[in-house]
Image (cartoon, rainbow, N blue to C red):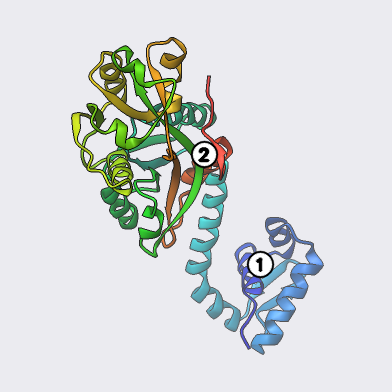
Amino acid sequence: MPVNFEYFKVFYYVAKYRCITQAAEALSLTQPSVTRSIQSLEAQLGCSLFHRSKKGVTLTNEGQMIFQRIFTACDLMFSAEEELEQLKHTSTGIVRIGTDDLDIRQDYMLALAERFRAQYPEVKLRIVQRDGAELTEALEAGTLDFCILADASTGQAEEFTPDLEYQVLNEYQDVVIVGEAYAHLAGREITLRELAPYPLIVWVPGTASRRFFEELYRRHGLVMAPAVETANIAFQMLLTERGFGYSFVPRHCAEEKIRQGRLFPLRLANCPLSRRLLLLTSKTRPLSLTAQKFLRLLRQAGGEGAPWPEYS
């Protein structure tokens, strides 16, 4: 019959202190409880482990042999428990985050980073921007704690390997924008086919946003033909404002310029532009405590199905 490990734990402390009272204090137990545990262990092992006297307890030959066998293992285990408990109440370590198209989410990530730093100033943040495929490889290899990705396609989430799992953090809306040169397109509903002949300003190849809009055009039987490609959303909006063409950007990024009358949103017919922000984690690699703290903050900022968080 397997012996309850808690009995060995009690035995370890009694043998270490040679005193039931001190062992009880170290374990936050009562003396009778410690005595019962020792008696139960002796009954299961079929031998006496301690000589008892008014001065305390000493190990029998059998007790000495067992103590020598378990001392190192127990000492390491209980030290690890103490260190783990200390980690729970300290703010050290590093959180490794992977993201694609960081330019889209820079305000979001900046707000999260500032909140996290305010709570855990000693924790280091490492934010890596890579292509989605590179990020998932890094996550599987254990060089990243988690990834924050935009849906690159309608079926992307189903393409992740079985060792990875995703959660929808929130959704956001893209919008088609033009500058003054093409403002005549605003104010009425327009189809993607009608819009396609105009010059398009779009993300560079290899990004999640580029793949998303390439698929959008394919679903409408069109081939996307960019006039300008850029990897910077601020520059993309500036080119649009200056009349280089039309572009797709997250509405929250263009809202201020739309209010100022520098950009004009178009009403695209039968063409939903809702996208999801995904949190990707590994099923096989447990998160560090510091990474878990960041994830708690991340989920508080925008839970599943929540709108894009607003930050001042």
| Res 113 → quadrant | top left
Q: Residues within 10 Å of mark 2 (few under 14, many from 20)?
A: some
**Nearer-N-terminus badge (1/2):** 1
Label 1 CA crowd tier, 10 Å (few <14, some 14–19, many 20+): many
**Number of callouts:** 2
Q: Secondary structure at mark 1?
A: helix
Residue drawn at point x = 39 percent, y = 35 percent: 125
Relative to 44, is 233 on the left or the right? left
Q: Which residue is mark 1?
A: 14
User: Which amino acid type is marked by label 2?
Assistant: Leu
Instruction: Say which mark, if any, is on residue 298.
Output: 2
* Local SS, label 2: helix
Image location of residue 291, percent across then percent down: 46, 45
Determine the residue positioned at 74% across, 79% down: 39
Q: Choose between 252 and 67: the one closer to the eye.
A: 252
Q: Is residue 238 above or below residue 65?
A: above
Position in image of residue 123 (x %, y %): 44, 35
Q: Amino acid at mark 1?
A: Val
298 over 228 or under it: above or below: below
Left or right relative to 220: residue 1 = right
Residue at the spot x=40%, y=34% of the render? 124
Q: Tell which residue pokes out farthest to the right in this image.
A: 32
